[in-house]
Amino acid sequence: MLKPLFLCIILSSPFLLFCQKENLVPNPSFEKFKMIPEDVAQGPQSLDTWTFPNIEGTGEYYHARGTNKSGVLKNRFGKQIPLEGNAYAGICMTRRFREYLQVKLKRPLIKNQEYEIVFHVSRADRIGSGTVDEFSVVFSEQAFKIWKNKKLKQTPDLVFEGEVEN
């Protein structure tokens, strides 16, 4: 019996969107939500389906109806028009701080079957940590909890390298 997999996305950028052909990712454009954010750090209580496994650090959810701190055209980190829909999620990584984002796939992946993974990543306009040069994906049968903003102990299943520019 195939076990459900959790996808944990590890980014060095505060903005992320994930989509795929034959999309196995629920809520890929972050349109389903529990509440419209009014400030940064409201990702966990705002997002539906996606989770932020950090015990410390929260992650962000930005929506077109958000405030000047949590909107898409203006927020604390700059602005970004969503690739589709009205929203996007954000995580932050620095040398001392890491946020993660994860989602349970709609169905398990099948061994030896090919899948296409497409990410749309944008770095924040206002952030002092520079540009992104790597982010990774981990597939797991269990959801993660990350204690005290540590690195994941699991080896990434996929690593994407190369500078990300706006």
Image: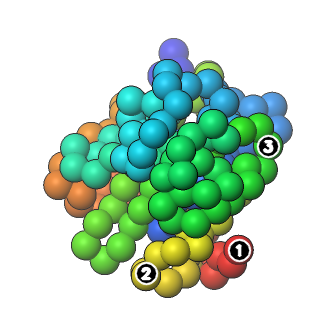
Q: Which residue is mark 2?
A: 129
- Image quadrant for the C terminus? bottom right
Dot 1 alpha-carbon crowd within 10 angstroms: few under 14, some 14 to 19, many 20 or more: few
How many other residues sit within 10 Å of disc 3, few (<14), some (14-19) or many (≥20)? few
Judging from the image, what secondary structure is the residue with disc 2 in?
loop
Mark sitting earlier along the chain (1/2):
2
| Mark 3 secondary-structure assignment | loop
Task: Please give the residue where the numbered disc 3 appears in the rendered image.
Answer: 84
Question: Which residue type does callout 2 highlight?
Answer: Ser
Distance (Cα) linking label 3 and label 2: 27 Å
> Could you tell which of marks 3 and 2 lies nearer the N-terminus?
3
> 134 or 125, which is in the foreground?
125
**Of residues 90 and 109, which is closer to you in this image?**
90
Label 1: element kind = loop
| Residue 98 marker | none
Q: What is the distance, in whole Å, between disc 1 and disc 3 at their CAs?
A: 16 Å
Instruction: Please give the residue where the numbered disc 1 appears in the rendered image.
Output: 166
Residue 126 position in % (x across, y down):
52, 74
Q: Of the residues shown, which amino acid type is indicated by label 3? A: Glu
Q: Nearer the viewer, residue 32 or 81?
A: 81
Q: Are marks 1 and 2 in contact (CB under 8 Å)?
A: no
Q: Earlier in the sequence, mark 1 or mark 3?
A: 3
Which residue shows up at 47% across the image and 76% down it?
127
